[in-house]
Amino acid sequence: MKRIGVFTSGGDAPGMNAAIRAVVRTGVAAGLEVVGIRSGYEGMIAGDLIPLGPRDVANTLQRGGTMLFTARSKEFLTPEGRAKAAANLRTAGVEGLVCIGGDGSYRGALKLMQEHDIPVVGAPGTIDNDLYGSDYTIGFDTAVNIALDAIDRIRDTAASHSRVFFIEVMGRHAGFIALEVGIAGGAEVIVLPEDPVDPSVCAEVIRDSSRKGKRSSIVVVAEGGYPGGAQGLAEAVKTRSGIEPKVTVLGHIQRGGSPTAMDRVLASRLGAAGVEALLAGKRGVAVGQINDEIALTPLEEAVQQRKDINRLKYKLAQVLAL
Amino acid sequence: MKRIGVFTSGGDAPGMNAAIRAVVRTGVAAGLEVVGIRSGYEGMIAGDLIPLGPRDVANTLQRGGTMLFTARSKEFLTPEGRAKAAANLRTAGVEGLVCIGGDGSYRGALKLMQEHDIPVVGAPGTIDNDLYGSDYTIGFDTAVNIALDAIDRIRDTAASHSRVFFIEVMGRHAGFIALEVGIAGGAEVIVLPEDPVDPSVCAEVIRDSSRKGKRSSIVVVAEGGYPGGAQGLAEAVKTRSGIEPKVTVLGHIQRGGSPTAMDRVLASRLGAAGVEALLAGKRGVAVGQINDEIALTPLEEAVQQRKDINRLKYKLAQVLAL
Amino acid sequence: MKRIGVFTSGGDAPGMNAAIRAVVRTGVAAGLEVVGIRSGYEGMIAGDLIPLGPRDVANTLQRGGTMLFTARSKEFLTPEGRAKAAANLRTAGVEGLVCIGGDGSYRGALKLMQEHDIPVVGAPGTIDNDLYGSDYTIGFDTAVNIALDAIDRIRDTAASHSRVFFIEVMGRHAGFIALEVGIAGGAEVIVLPEDPVDPSVCAEVIRDSSRKGKRSSIVVVAEGGYPGGAQGLAEAVKTRSGIEPKVTVLGHIQRGGSPTAMDRVLASRLGAAGVEALLAGKRGVAVGQINDEIALTPLEEAVQQRKDINRLKYKLAQVLAL
Amino acid sequence: MKRIGVFTSGGDAPGMNAAIRAVVRTGVAAGLEVVGIRSGYEGMIAGDLIPLGPRDVANTLQRGGTMLFTARSKEFLTPEGRAKAAANLRTAGVEGLVCIGGDGSYRGALKLMQEHDIPVVGAPGTIDNDLYGSDYTIGFDTAVNIALDAIDRIRDTAASHSRVFFIEVMGRHAGFIALEVGIAGGAEVIVLPEDPVDPSVCAEVIRDSSRKGKRSSIVVVAEGGYPGGAQGLAEAVKTRSGIEPKVTVLGHIQRGGSPTAMDRVLASRLGAAGVEALLAGKRGVAVGQINDEIALTPLEEAVQQRKDINRLKYKLAQVLAL
């Protein structure tokens, strides 16, 4: 193997640049040439490839977003699109790929490998942490800390006014961010996609908090935790209880910003592991970190299996809201 | 004068605690007793007063929100409510008041003085910066920096995906936050209540940015800058142009958090100036900082006059978006 | 068991308040009374105990330092001191203790148990991460992120001036902080107590970085990584090579500040686990988190065994500095 | 005038990139070509010039340091060096210069103008705020907030341990940073170059704080506030009183990092004003912001006059330490 490609795909996540840097430097240190493919599968089809040396990734470790850009590509969902992408890779002499992204990006990489025999390795880059095969995904810790920072701010205001705040964090299908932020932010209620909440019960917990002398209540709601998200739940609670919650949707601020130490180290390890896996002849696997060690999981398994939230933590959150 | 009261009223603003601390310590240093009135005019009516010594305000300088809480009081809008409040103050021996708040809080204080002859001095505590009589209000600089931090994060994401973001910041009637944040955040368009925007023109600027090679565009919209805020404008732009902006409403995170150095120093100066004004026999005035010096403005003038945004800065913003 | 005590001891660490809060709320939820012992063993000897209910620990989760204070006690090193402490605990009806601290604090707790038959459980609270029995200690992740933030800032300056910076981080006996920060901060050299560095080799790496086109070099030095710390190493490098490094000693800023999400969640889990261990009749054990699960380790083992840094990460750091 | 040059010189300051960006975009908008001179006067002598268009300064507004680098040049202190620099500028067709820097940079620009008739305009870029002709210099507000952040952290630790901390901030000849940070950080004592402190008096204030019930004391010391800085003063205090202060020298972290909103707006205004001054035929002037308006000051005056600290603020600090 002489030349490998690296790209980011799907939603951007803090730490993606650290992963790219690790792929480039580990690759070059092992004698490989590395090319960056810009804008994910879109750039693969368009042939938007650039050579990447150790200096090209200097000063990127601390930057949010992705220097290789990312996009969603409809054309890549077609066999013709993938054929074009594969042809471009061959022309450029790319003999292996490190794909940094989430679920959908993994599926794309898998198809490319199955149809065109291009060795691919996935690295989990998504803030949602909902990828099987790694305890944490690149970007998760940063997203959690950004959301937490917002909650700390809102608590100042909530306590000054004796108010109830419903705060929506990312997580359409998985409650990892909501659970972590909810515990760390001292939320009175945490609402996860994994565990439907009854608005009447939610209202009762808020009223009970108030009876216990709390000046304010914070409810952390994952996007997919209730139909209509935090706004939907707030209205349901209001209807049933007369409580008038304020709603804040954190939105895209959770995606950006300089990655935390944990995300930079994780991304660095996984980027390096991706190259090592290719060099070791692995293909169709996702690299991950499990119990602080590098682990490989077949991409097929990674996209099919579901990672569960830690139920013990969820229970703990309820006790701590006492 | 032997005893004075201090309270916060209206929306909370970072730096209010620094102002309270300055009132207490300056007051005590001058031989006064200081009482804190909790939850603004509501607590004044309920008689929720607490004595405040120098140690009671220790370790508050860096905290967001207000340790004296704040609330909106309907009862205080009635003559009976104000009579109750005045009676409580007299019973407690409170001979002067420092009111930290915005426009509405100033009006309340003025009424209390006019009807019950209680000396009041106002200090401008509101993130919106829309109070006449001070170049800057307590909390403005912090709110601007929090919003800026959010915009920096969103730009990472916007640039990674080639996207257009509409970001709503606070400011129903005044565009101070939007203007400052827009310049500091490098916004392509800044939409202020003071200056109506045509969605078609806005769309044209965005398209032009893209033609010039910008990977992303940020439009900063003050709450009151367009009917329906950022969401309303985004839809209008979409209808006219086909551009599909992402919308983020920063909301209450702008209110909270540890105050910046500028807000802490400003609040400290204005809190101290409030006490000095009372001791100097001033009444019915607002303290402010104009050209780095303490200035007094009659409360009547402060609530009637309008502070204008700096038009030169607004023009500068357009040049810098080149 | 009806009443338990909780205290913090040794150097303070961000997250200690989250652990105290978890002890109190988990304890009360289980029907226990909880008392806080102030200033560690010093307060235990002086009888400085305060009852702690769920509201007393409200609004502490996000605060740095420790609300129960901490101190080093010489008297507790004597049998008489420990006898006094034990007598005070008995008088107050304290039937079990959760000790949050490091190595020295664990040793003290162990002696107290051995001599006076008081059930103790330790929870690892130290930024250094050098305690056996837990993958991470409370405060480590925050300290790493604070140090990283400082390094990001210094890199701006270093790159603007083409300079070499030696930055000293905490870690007298263990290089956990230095290693993590070094990888996350993109350090050219990382100097650990676990691995002596030759100043000439260090100088050669710096010169090589410059030859490779890097505008600046960052050397991260653990306190105990070289005699005289970063300053000592800088002088040795200067003597041997003529390179003139700037030196920054981060010092105590690494200890303070609002804990990260990871530290708050870890502290919450370990605080709760401490109470559960006492209730389950465990004594003389340290709670920890190993592979994301709660683990118990005998205190004797915890103070005798040594936790090693991850050598693979250390090698990775060298590759990534390419 | 068809082509102008811009450069940064002396110590780097957060906001320099925002000023460069404003020079480029305002210049281009006015029909000028703009070239960047790298590494200050050193690059001017070496002919290290690069063309700068609007896109070249994209995404720099939020970055610390300076994209044009900075250096100190011994050769420029000689007439021969300046002649070389002037010749390079003429060859490149540079007809005017915007110099972003401090005192020494202004002197250099002045000499270049006097000896070689090249129109120069200065813009105040230095964290120290000690330049006459502008209320604030670019980088000051950011440096103050970074130092404040460090002090907030140290206070957590100081209060947990009942300790006295001496914290050294930048300011060899002027106490602007120390004064602002001291007030904002609630320092018990602030030590400025402008006002010698007697260590015995300092010790007495610390003892008095302790008697008043304060758990910790913070002394903020400007670099030039005492021989040997914070360490020197700490030793003098220890000798006279037995107090054992901890010392932290903040050092270079104060220089770096993303600029605050205030610094970005100030830098944007001053960069634009620099270009406008050149276009208006001004030469040998420094642009500044005085009372929120753009002001021009002859460079000769700017380097000779001294800006004083605000004595009223200094007195206020003492009252607030009550």
Image (spheres, coloured by chain):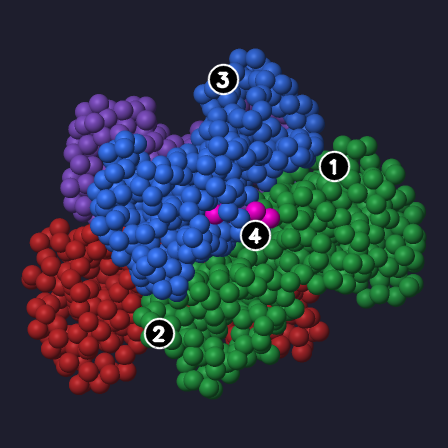
Chain colours: A purple, B blue, C red, D green
Q: CA distance from mark 4 to mark 2?
A: 33 Å
Residue type, numbered disc 1 = Thr
Q: Measure how far apart labels 4 and 1 are at the Cα level.
A: 32 Å
Find the distance from the CA under tag 1 to the CA under tag 3. Answer: 32 Å
Residue A70: x %, y % from top left: 55, 32
Mark in front: 4 vs 1: 4
Q: Which residue is mark 3?
A: B235
Q: Are marks 4 and 2 in contact (CB under 8 Å)?
A: no
Q: Position of residue B128 (x, y in %)?
A: 47, 37
Q: Looking at the rendered structure, which numbered label has been put on residue D26?
A: 1
The first of marks 2 and 1 along the sequence is 1
Q: Quadrant of the C terminus of chain D?
A: bottom left
Which comes before the other along the chain, label 3 or label 4?
3
Task: Depth check: give the residue in front, A288 or D165.
Answer: D165
Quarter of the image where one finds residue A150 = top left
Horizontal relation, residue B166 to residue A87: left or right: left
Q: Is residue A87 left or right of residue A267?
A: right
Residue C87 lies within the magenta run: no
Residue on which disc 2 sits: D210
Q: Which residue is mark 4?
A: B293
Q: Position of residue D39 (x, y in %)?
A: 76, 55
Q: Which residues are magenta?
A: B287-291
**Circle 4: is it few (<14), some (14-19), or many (20+) Cα within 10 Å?**
few
Check if mark 3's residue and mark 2's residue have beta carbons within 8 Å.
Answer: no
Kindly tell me whether residue D171 is visible in this rendering: yes
Q: Are marks 3 and 2 on the same chain?
A: no
Above or below, B101 relative to C10:
above
> What's the CA distance linking mark 3 and mark 4?
45 Å
Q: Amino acid at mark 3?
A: Glu
Front label number (4 vs 2): 4
Circle 2: residue type: Ser
Label 1 Cα crowd, 10 Å radius (few <14 / some 14-19 / many 20+): many
